[in-house]
Amino acid sequence: MNILIIGDDARSVNILTFILRQEGYDVSSIVDRTQAERALSDYTADMLILDEDTIEADLLRRIETIRGGSTIPLILLCETTSEHEIIDAYEAGIDDYIAKPYSYAMLLAHVYAQLRRARVIPSTLVPNLQVANISLDPERHTVTLPSGVTRQLTNLEFRLLYCLMTNRGHVLSTETIIEKVWGYTGEGDRNLLKSLVSRLRSKVEPYPREPRLIMTIAGVGYKFNPDGV
């Protein structure tokens, strides 16, 4: 597995590189933001790690740019910040967030979980999924609605919709969905899932405030309702 690390602090990036190489990963690193865009096109990576100090508007724009050209797992390492800023980062396109300072064991657990999730749902191998005239394209990360409109999905939105559609008609607990989408469970994940569900509804529901496809089952979780089309 090849991991690309991009960050401003050479010492921090070097430590990350050393840790991951000790675990057997092939690691490349960039400590110059001006080279980051070229690096993403030059390197064939299975994962991208952004090593940052704070979540700012410029970082969110860079994440959106990265996500616009790639669907590989993207982990953000950043100083502890507000839940609102973390959600902004998820909405921009990250797949995972680890607050600094963190233990090396926790870092490795998150890296393994994200790579495992990527292997569980390899976009190039999963066939198109169609349920109730809704078509999900894993390779392009798009969903085509009964109206014929096609929407682009982020990596997390795709994972959530894939999970719900393959379990259509069945109620999935919040814990099960979090594990399948993020690859782990932890404090605060319920709010992140709620935000992700809201964003997905805005793309697939005719009336997001009155959902008929992605149903909330109070106290349990969510289910995909094919009869809601």
Image: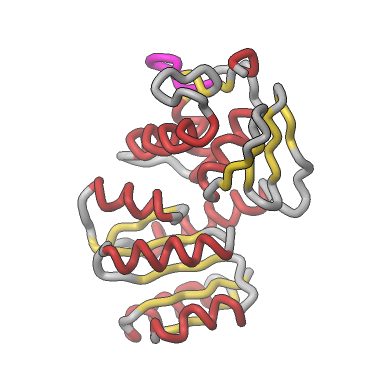
Observer-nearest residue: 15 or 210? 210
Q: Is residue 102 above or below residue 159?
A: below
When asked about the image quadrant of residue 188, the answer is top left
Observer-nearest residue: 10 or 215? 215
Q: Residue 2's x, y, as percent? A: 61, 72
Q: Residue at x 47, y 44 (%)?
A: 184
Q: Residue at x 29, y 58 (%)?
A: 99
Q: Residue 93's x, y, as percent? A: 45, 55
Q: Is residue 80 left or right of residue 18?
A: left
Q: Is residue 148 above or below residue 95?
A: above
Q: Residue at x 35, y 57 (%)?
A: 98
Name the magenta segment's main secondary structure.
strand
Q: Is residue 220 magenta?
A: yes
Q: Is residue 97 left or right of residue 135?
A: left
Q: Is residue 126 left or right of residue 218?
A: right
Q: Residue 159's x, y, as percent? A: 57, 42
Q: Is residue 47 visible?
A: yes
Q: Is residue 101 visible?
A: no
For the record, the magenta segment spans: 216-223
Q: Residue at x 43, y 76 (%)?
A: 6
Q: Is residue 56 left or right of residue 171?
A: left
Q: Is residue 226 above or below residue 164?
A: above
In the rendered image, the quadrant that contains the C terminus is: top right
In the rendered image, the quadrant that contains the N terminus is: bottom right
When asked about the image quadrant of residue 42, the answer is bottom right
